[in-house]
Image (cartoon, helix red, strand yellow):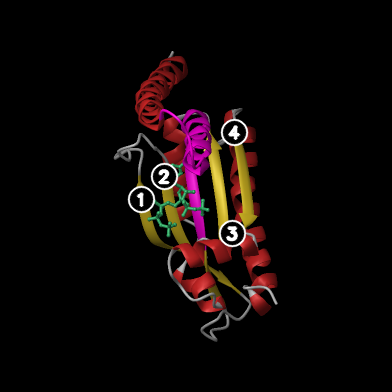
């Protein structure tokens, strides 16, 4: 049986509802302002293998409770914007949703990680008509949302490749180059934002 057990349909339902809302924001921005709020949106329910691997890595029992409550990223969304300001606009809109309660926020954009990683992370709780693992109905389910710019996203993908290679040569050199590029990309993101503001004001 799946690690998500009988809750898999509820996870799919919750993911569908939040995705639909976010897509409707994008359609609204496109219609109202002539440009979308974000460039693309990815979403997934973490595969059973990845969830089991993560539980093992965190030394947690492979129970449905640990998969859904202790770890809070069974449902994951990634929203990728063109401009930095739009990251914070997406955050604001998500916080305003009436069926969403924000549990945790990590602003790795204002405070980048030491390796150069930048992204805005939110853990939210979404209410659902379906029963949750604590027996509540309506229930609530956790969703992890990562929001970042295209530049931050390409960087994270490259850095992720390195972290998965076991016997990589020149790891130190590559890490310091990645850090340098992360800072350059952050500077380009700021310049892009400034140019966009200048265009919009003129
Ligand atoms: P996976 O397989 O991607 O889910 P958590 O590990 O989630 O319990 P943590 O690490 O405190 O708790 O959460 P954080 O910092 O919000 O990171 C969550 C996710 O963000 C990570 O998931 C990565 O996907 C991504 N992330 C965080 N730091 C980095 C980084 O330095 N580089 C890259 N490329 N991605 C990062 P997991 O848990 O690693 O696994």
Q: Is mark 2 within 8 Å of ligand 1?
A: no
Query: Viewed as shown, does residue 159 lie left or right of 23?
Result: left
Residue position marked by numbered label 1 in the rendering: 106
Query: Are discs 4 and 1 less than 8 Å apart at CB?
Result: no
Q: Earlier in the sequence, mark 1 or mark 2?
A: 1
For label 4, the SS is: loop
Q: Residues within 10 Å of mark 3 (few under 14, many from 20)?
A: few
Q: Earlier in the sequence, mark 2 or mark 4?
A: 4
Query: Which class describes the residues within 10 Å of circle 1: few (<14), some (14-19), or many (20+)?
Result: some
Q: Is label 3 within 8 A of ligand 1 (CB to nearest ligand atom)?
A: yes
**Residue at horizontal 59 percent and vertical 59 percent from the top:** 50
What residue appears at the point 64 percent right and 46 percent down from the top-left corner? 23
Q: Is residue 26 left or right of residue 146?
A: right
Alpha carbon distance from label 4 to label 3? 27 Å
Residue pointed to by mark 2: 120
Is tag 3's residue or tag 2's residue first in the polypeptide sequence? 3
Q: Which residues are magenta?
A: 143-170
Residue 74 relative to residue 121: left or right: right
* Residue occupying the point 70% across, 71% down: 9
């Amino acid at each position: 049986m799946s690690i998500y057990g009988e809750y898999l349909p509820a996870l799919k339902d919750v993911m569908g509802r939040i995705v639909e809302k976010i897509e409707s924001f994008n359609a609204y921005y496109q219609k109202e302002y002539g440009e979308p709020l974000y460039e693309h949106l990815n979403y997934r329910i973490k595969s059973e293998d990845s969830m089991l691997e993560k539980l093992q890595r965190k030394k947690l029992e492979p129970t449905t409770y640990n998969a859904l409550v202790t770890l809070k990223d069974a449902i994951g969304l990634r929203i990728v914007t063109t401009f930095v300001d739009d990251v914070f606009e997406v955050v604001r809109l998500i916080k305003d949703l009436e069926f969403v309660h924000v549990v945790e926020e990590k602003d790795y954009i204002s405070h980048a990680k030491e390796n150069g990683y930048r992204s805005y992370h939110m853990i939210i709780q979404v209410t659902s008509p379906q029963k949750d693992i604590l027996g509540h109905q309506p229930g609530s389910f956790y969703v992890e949302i990562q929001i970042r710019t295209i530049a931050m996203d390409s960087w994270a993908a490259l850095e992720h490749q390195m972290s998965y290679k076991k016997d990589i040569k020149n790891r130190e050199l590559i890490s310091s180059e990645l850090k340098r590029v992360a800072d350059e990309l952050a500077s380009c993101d700021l310049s892009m934002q400034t140019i966009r503001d200048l265009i919009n004001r003129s």
